[in-house]
Image (tube, grey):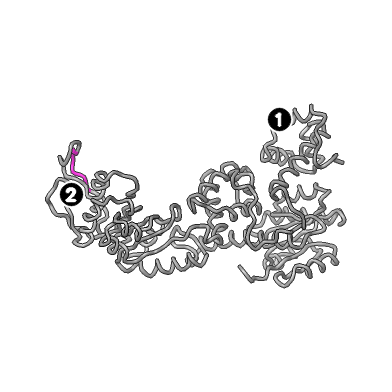
Amino acid sequence: MQGQIIKIWFLTEDTGLADAIARALGDCFETNASSELRIDLLNERLASSHVLLIDLRTSNSQDFGEAALRLMGELNGLRSHPPIVVLCDEEHRGPFLRAVEYGADDSITNPPNINELRIILRRVHRLYASEQELQRLRGNGTAGRLHQLIGNSAPMQELFAMARKIATCDVSVLITGETGTGKELLARAIHQLSGRNSAPLVAFSCANLPETLVEDELFGHEKGAFTGALTTRCGRLEAADQGTLFLDEIGDLGIGLQPKLLRVLQERRFERLGGNKTINVDIRLVCATHRNLDEMVQQGKFRDDLYYRLNVVQMHLPPLRERRDDIPLLAQQFLQQAAQQFQKSTRHFSPLAMNALEDYNWPGNVRELGNVVQRAVAFCDDEAVDVYHLPEFMRGVREKPGLPTDVDNLPMSHSYEEEVRRFKRGLILNTLQQCGWRKSECARTLGVARGYLHRLINQLGIQDREISVKGQNSDYKSPLGPVM
């Protein structure tokens, strides 16, 4: 997405402000303005725009503000529309809160800081583009998908091309990569693309298992081979005949079993435990490991002859931190899966939530991302996953390389999301205090629906006992001052 010109459609009555913003944003943005708020007249413009910027400042006429909010409501009824960023006055939160309720993706206060506006516009466009790309991949695309593996980053595109090329060649494959990067998914993709896809793929993990158990699992046993062997049992090698055997964590295979596996690869036959009947098998072996097998060979922990047999083609799955461009795409995929599983109406991430996902280092890689998104959807009762639905350790300050740190030319003692959370909590608690702690009156004062106020109270962790304590504490001072 680097170098792409982002097309902005600015809905405002202030042509002077529109011209000033268009000049300030620079050559990477194409800004057009209009005061027309009828959706039937905007359809063509919406189809060619990347972001919709809506002016909700109180200096506008009241009719324009109400019409803009009605337009946002109509846009929510469409199957697809560009992301929405609203421009509003910091001291008048009513229009902003209503805009959030109508589905605004982000906001910026007036007068807008141009550096901050650029960041917001790029961020919401990137999220929207990821959602659209995911839909395209699900529909008919193959360039960014390899069966269940998804990725548009350069390393994944190279990996997908390599997998398609070697899948039809019946050679052994060694997949390397950190835990949680999707090594088994890659093995299954290779199997599905191969000529063996009508036969089974049999998967087995060698990790942290006793050597005797691994041997029994792989080779099977005859009746009476050992105490408790009451019947003959086929092993994984037999089960994978004519298909693919996937051995995960091959680096954990015991040194005593390695020559036995090597013999199977060389001669394509073996005997069950306790038997002398030779069984012929035709298998393709795909192995995976997070260990460095080169070092293990040098240390005498892994046989070099077996290593050369396994390492005919080596494929490396990069960690998620080295392909951060894929995080929005993967996160949206996991969100849609979790929303369907939990029967939730959650559809997307807030910009702050996605920013936190992109900033995190992901030591557990794609598997950890999937678990975090699933947890967030489980806690979310709205259409958008917010940053407060993410684990606490992901909400801290993380500066992204390349982004300006002097957005307001002032150092911040808290992260942006913490400041927003503090503002929301203070606003609600102060308004409740002014309204005698009556939630219905508080909702009317803020200009929001009562149900939305209840959701905000729950999201911000405001407890009924906290409201009672604040009401009794005459020394309590909101950071916002009195609500007018």
| Magenta-colored span | 229-234
Inspect this view and state whether residue 446 appears.
Answer: yes
Distance from the alpha carbon under mark 1 to that under mark 2:
67 Å
Q: Is residue 304 left or right of residue 17?
A: left
Where is residue 343 shown, x and y percent of the image? 55, 44
Q: Is residue 452 left or right of residue 198?
A: right
Name the kind of residue labelled 2 in the image: Arg
Of residues 384 and 299, which is closer to you in this image?
299
Where is residue 196 shown, x and y percent of the image? 30, 62
- Image quadrant for the C terminus? top right
Compared to residue 428, the image places residue 234 above or below, namely: below
Q: Residue at x 79, y 28 (%)?
A: 473
Compared to residue 252, the image places residue 6 above or below, namely: below
Q: Which residue is mark 2?
A: 272
Q: Residue at x 61, y 52 (%)?
A: 356
Comes first in the chain, label 1 or label 2: 2
Where is residue 80 shown, x and y percent of the image? 64, 59
Look at the numbered disc 2 and give the secondary structure of its residue: loop
- Please give the label number shown on residue 129: none
Where is residue 252 shown, x and y percent of the image? 33, 51
Compared to residue 48, the image places residue 420 above or below, namely: above
- Image quadrant for the N terminus? bottom right
- Please give the label number shown on residue 464: 1
- Our reading of the magenta stretch's main secondary structure is loop
Inspect this view and state whether residue 191 appears.
Answer: no
Of residues 301 and 288, which is closer to you in this image?
301
